[in-house]
Image: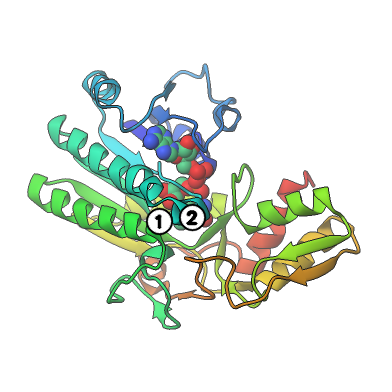
Amino acid sequence: MKILVTGGAGFIGSHLCDALIERDNDLTVVDNLVLGRKENISHLLGRSGFEFIEENLLHEEGMRTLFKEGHFDMVYHLAANSDIQKGGKDPWVDYDLTFNTTFHILQLMKEFEVKKFFFASTSAIYGETYDVLNEDYGPLRPVSNYGAGKLASEAFISAFSSTYGFQTWITRFPNVVGERFTHGVIHDFIHKLQKNPKELEVLGNGEQCKPYVYVKDLVEGILYVVEHASADYNVYMLGSDTRTKVKEIAAMVIEEMGLDATIRYTGGDRGWVGDVPEFRYNLDRVNTLGWKAAYTSNEAVRLAIQKALGK
Ligand SMILES: NC(=O)c1ccc[n+]([C@@H]2O[C@H](COP(=O)([O-])OP(=O)(O)OC[C@H]3O[C@@H](n4cnc5c(N)ncnc54)[C@H](O)[C@@H]3O)[C@@H](O)[C@H]2O)c1
C-alpha cells in the first residue's frame, strides 16, 4: 500500500514506520519536527519505498501538493501535540496541533479520495473517572485541552467516515513507553536524576496509577487491529489491563541507574492540572479480536527504563 504517516518522526510514529516498512509498504512521512526528531527515522532515510517530507500539516498548499502527488491508499494520523502540560498553559496548542491537524487531514482525504484512515487516540478523552474504561464508556468529559482536542477529532472522524465513506480504525492508547520517547514520566525522571543524582522530585504523591504499554507492543497491536478489524468504523482500546504506580516507576528508575536518591513528592493526588490520578482499561474487545500485549505494565516500564539507559 502507499501510506502516509503523519507525525512519523515522533516517538510512536517512528516505530510504526519501522513496522510498516518491514511489511513492504511504500511510506511517506510528514512531520514538521516541532516535537519529533529526524534521528528517529534516520535509519530509514534513503531506503527505497521511504520518503520524509518536513512540512506542517496546517500548511494548506504544501499538504495539497503532497496529497496530489502521493496517491495514498491509507493515512495513519499520529501528529498531535504530545505535551499535555504545554497545552494546558496555551489552549491554542491543542486546538491547532491536536484537533486542527486532524480536521485538515480529513479534508484532504475527502478531496483526494483516500479511503482508509487510522487515528491515534487516547485515554485522555475519558477525563477523570475511577470506572474501568472500555470503548462504549460515557459520558466522555476530558479534563485536558489535549483530551478535548482528541475527542473533537474523534467526532469529526466519525462524521467524515460516515459521510464520505472512509474505512476507519481508532485505537485509544494509555501511557506508551520505550525507545525514542520524547516526553513522559520515565523520560522526566531520568533527566532529573542526571541533573541531580541525590534527589528525585516527583510531581504529586506518587500514588497515581495507570497502565503503561511498551511501544513495539503497541505498534504490533495497532497493525493487528488494522489487519483484523473489518468493520467500516473500528474503535479499540489498546494497552495493558495491568497498572503501575508513579512511585514504583521512580523506584525502578533509581534502581536501574544504580543510585541511592531520595524521593521528594510535591504532594496532591496528581502531577499537574489536566493530569488524572488513575485509570484502568478493559481490553475485552481487542482480546476477543485476538491481540494481547506481550508485556505487563510493570515489565513495559522496566524495559523502557533499561532501553533508555542503553542497557
Ligand atoms: N505517547 C503516549 O503515551 C501516547 C498516549 C496516547 C496517545 N498518543 C498519541 O499518539 C500519537 C503519537 O504520540 P507520540 O508520543 O509519538 O508523540 P510525539 O510528539 O513524539 O509525536 C508527534 C509528532 O507529531 C509531529 N507534529 C505535531 N504537530 C505537527 C504539525 N502541525 N505538522 C506536522 N507534524 C506535527 C511532531 O513533530 C511529532 O513528531 C499522538 O497523536 C499522541 O496524541 C500518545
Question: x, y (%) of residue 112?
Answer: 16, 29
Question: x, y (%) of residue 22?
Answer: 49, 34
| Nearer to the camera, 17 or 229 | 17
As helix, strand or loop, the secondary structure at mark 2 comes to helix
As helix, strand or loop, the secondary structure at mark 1 comes to helix
Residue type highlighted by circle 1: Tyr
Colouring scheme applied when the structure was drawn: rainbow
Vertical position of residue 134 compared to residue 308: above or below: below
- Residue 95 visible in the displayed image: yes
Residue beneath label 1, please? 146
**Counting other residues with Cα less than 10 Å from the Cα at mark 1, is it few (<14), some (14-19), or many (20 or more)?**
many
Q: What residue appears at the point 67 percent right and 64 percent down from the top-left corner?
A: 299
Q: Is residue 284 left or right of residue 235?
A: right
| Nearer to the camera, 283 or 38 | 38
Q: What residue appears at the point 44 percent right and 29 percent down from the top-left corner?
A: 32
Q: What residue appears at the point 50 percent right and 34 percent down from the top-left corner?
A: 9
Q: Quadrant of residue 96?
A: top left
**Counting other residues with Cα less than 10 Å from the Cα at mark 2, is it few (<14), some (14-19), or many (20 or more)?**
many
> Ligand 1 within 8 A of label 1's CB?
yes
- Circles 2 and 1 in contact, beta carbons < 8 Å: yes
Q: Is residue 249 left or right of residue 138?
A: right
Residue beneath label 2, please? 84
